[in-house]
Amino acid sequence: MSERLTMKEAARIPDALAPGHRMCAGCAHPIVARMIMKAAAGRPTVVTNATGCLEVATTIFPFTSWDVPWLHVAFENVAANASGIEAAWKAQRRKGKGPLAKYERLNVIAYAGDGGTYDIGFQALSGALERGHDFTYVLMDNEAYMNTGIQRSGGTPIGASTTTSPAGKVIPGKTEWKKPIMEIVVAHEIPYAATINPAWPQDVLDKCRKAFDTVGPKFLHAVIPCTRGWRYETSDTVSIARLATQTCIFPLYEVERVKGRPVWRLSGPSASIAKRPESKKPVSEYLEPQGRFRHLFRPKRNEELLKFIQEGVDLRWQMLQERCA
Amino acid sequence: MAKQELLGLNGNEASAYATKQVNPDVVAAYPITPQTIIVERFSEYVADGLVDTEFVAVESEHSAMSCSVGASAAGARAFTATAANGLALMWEILYIASSLRLPIVMAVANRALSGPINIHNDHSDAMGARDSGWIQIFCENAQEVYDASITAWRIAEHPRVQLPVMVCMDGFTISHTMENVMTLPDDAVKKFVGEREFIRVEGHMGEAELRLDPEAPLTMGPLDLQDFYFEHKIHQVDAMDDALEAIKDVDEEWAKVSGRGYGYAEPYLMGDAEVAVIGMGSAMGTVRHVVDELRQEGVNAGMVKLRLFRPFPAAELKKAVGRVPMLGVMEKCISFGAPASPLMEEIMTAYYHDKEKPMMANYVVGLGGRDVSPAMIREIYGSLLKNRKAGKVSKPMSYIGVRGD
Amino acid sequence: MSKARTWKELPKGAVSYRSSRDYKTGDWGVDAPRIDQAKCVKCNLCHMLCPEGCIAVREDGSPEPDLDYCKGCGICAKECPVKAIEMVRK
């Protein structure tokens, strides 16, 4: 069992991600990254960051927001960078020389967006998971290439209008479902994977602690609402994130490997919905406030597509519950 | 001078053996012909416990270089090896490794770039990487590979350099050809390479060694826009300039230990030469043989072997070329649409401002591993002699051995 | 503003040399939070959910926004469980 970090304790931990960064107002990235870095406090930590919003906006030269060692190399290779950092620590430890040699564990955290994970960084991620490096990969999923101006990725949800899957007269936004990244990652037989949501900070802290305490490759999938790309008011970031879990389009769960088998378990808010299915909100409540889904509601409701999305969400939620049973 | 042992090694094995003696912290590599033997041999050393290196069998060359960058940034001595398409896949990260000032060492078994796909030797892979900010050493034989695979670490980690180094050897002709290689004892190599040196930099949280250390955090690889990127590129220019000096120092020190000294550009019978060929890599051994034959036939032929391509040793090259009036530049690469091939362009540029300079002609040979035979080299000297006689270069660019050319 | 550094004055390897704390983002937004400390239950949620991390927690657990960095997103006001935060014009 990991030692619990309560929210009250976490609030007293100085941020390793300093203010003065240039993420957009209301961006979920720094909210989640701050929580993760609080959970990492006290552990020797090295961060490596794929190209993307978080990387760009926190390190505009000569400034940096990172009070931990931090490395950015490129877009598609953060898992390979993390592999190298972990290998360097292992080698220093084995040889008993170098500043990393004294650490029994080195907490290597790799941040990447959805583009850097589902798409261009997929190969490096798969390789690093297969090789079993001891690191925590955090997928900061804002569901499109936001840094280059809202282009669709393998993580963009069905129906979303992006600049390369625009809602047009004939095609209503993206026509494909989101790639089931958690299932794909879990299929690598890694020891720990979990979904996290900034609307439940204690759950984020708990899962980070668990990930950091587990040896081997860990994967955290964070929902990162984006005010610009999802098109909503800056103050709504956390409430939209909350709706993602309340509608079961982004359930909260974790997958631990116990005696060689993956054990799937719903976390707090999703477990409650499973117990009281009537508390599950319709997915339209999540979609409607977001400009990227506006065409599904205006000028008139696209009942057919909304029904199709609701059924798809229901099916996936049902399958997840079966795995968690 | 240390007592040496004579071993029968091919170029790949010489690279792997030297790297075993260096015992780097991290080796991340991916198989590709004709480099694969390096990774295989090194994995055997790891499996047999002869090194305590962390070996990472990555899933691609892109990750091989990315993993090396992560490891080197975290303070490790990192080594990798590749060839051709593998080097091409690393392209993006090559530039990043050098801009981060990471002293990674990489063996490159030079091979033709696709397409069409070909596994044999030419220099199109390394020549494409000539602007990536890496130091590039071209070896003529397995002995040079062995020596360069050791000195490369000292050059890369030199406090005034701090740049990655490519040790290039011709695919198959060097990588797979067994030769006699004089090797130093492990402890002599260990002593020569010592420990990795780090430069100190002033980061946002104070002064620190340039590495990822939780106790002295640095931000490596920030977003660098219009107001600073240019200045950071000048850092690399400066380091390359300094590398010319540093390489000389390291080579001289190696000569004291091993008895084998190398210049950047080695002249052979250039004193009274009327015609000469300059080039890089294994073919220069054949050129030397042809020069000997021509000398016996009464032709005042000479040659210059260039060992260092980046940084480009213009002064040493000119010194080695001396006062030869007619120079042929022989190389295994084409720069499509360019007025000449890469080496020719470098040499002509080096001479441009000089009043005294040789006439020059460019000869492309051996693409895709085509044998560079003594007959072809004779053809080049024949062409140079004709030019010399005519007092002008009749054909500035020739493709030697191409049917129909 | 001080004169920009020359290439010789910059640290090698392009490492960053200033903390973003030196870069104030407080002028990005028009609104800023006003906290009614009497209503506040010291749950620290506003601190946790602030993207800028600019709501400090005092010794007694009460929140204190640093307007030098506040971009005025309004998440704190929206998420406050007791509605102790109001967004007002700066």
Image (cartoon, coloured by chain):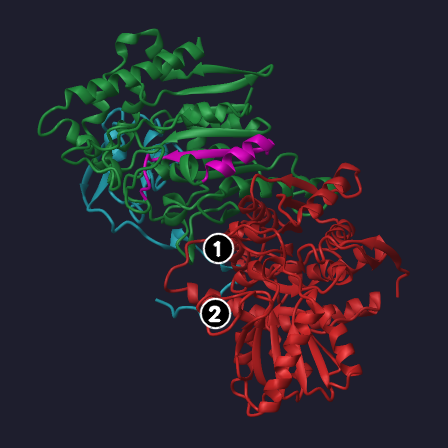
Q: Are marks 1 and 2 in contact (CB under 8 Å)?
A: no
Q: Residue at x 59, y 86 (%)?
A: B387
Position of the N terminus of chain A, as image quadrant, is: top right
Question: In the image, residue B382 lies at what x, y percent?
Answer: 65, 80
Q: Chain of mark 2?
A: C
Nearest the eye: A143 or B390: B390
Is residue B226 placed above or below A287 in the rendered structure?
below
Is residue B391 placed above or below B171 in the rendered structure?
below
Tell me, for residue C7, which label it has, or none.
Answer: 2
Judge whether residue B251 is colored magenta.
no
Position of the C terminus of chain A, as image quadrant, is: top left
Q: Residues in magenta? A: A121-146
Q: Write down the colour of chain B.
A: red
Binning the other alpha carbons within 10 Å of mark 1 as few (below 14), some (14 to 19) or many (20 upward) gives many
Question: In the image, residue B282 lies at what x, y percent?
Answer: 70, 64
Q: Work out which residue is located at the far right of the displayed protein and give it.
A: B3
The three-letter amino acid code for the residue at tag 1 is His
Q: Residue at x 72, y 58 (%)?
A: B174
Q: Chain of mark 1?
A: B
Quarter holding residue B240: bottom right
Chain drawn green, letter?
A
Nearest the eye: A31 or B53: B53
**SS under mark 2:** helix
User: How far is mark 1 from mark 2, CA to CA?
Assistant: 17 Å
Quarter holding residue A29: top left
Nearest the eye: A51 or B80: B80
Chain drawn cyan, letter?
C
Q: Residue at x 81, y 68 (%)?
A: B260
Binning the other alpha carbons within 10 Å of mark 2 as few (below 14), some (14 to 19) or many (20 upward) gives some
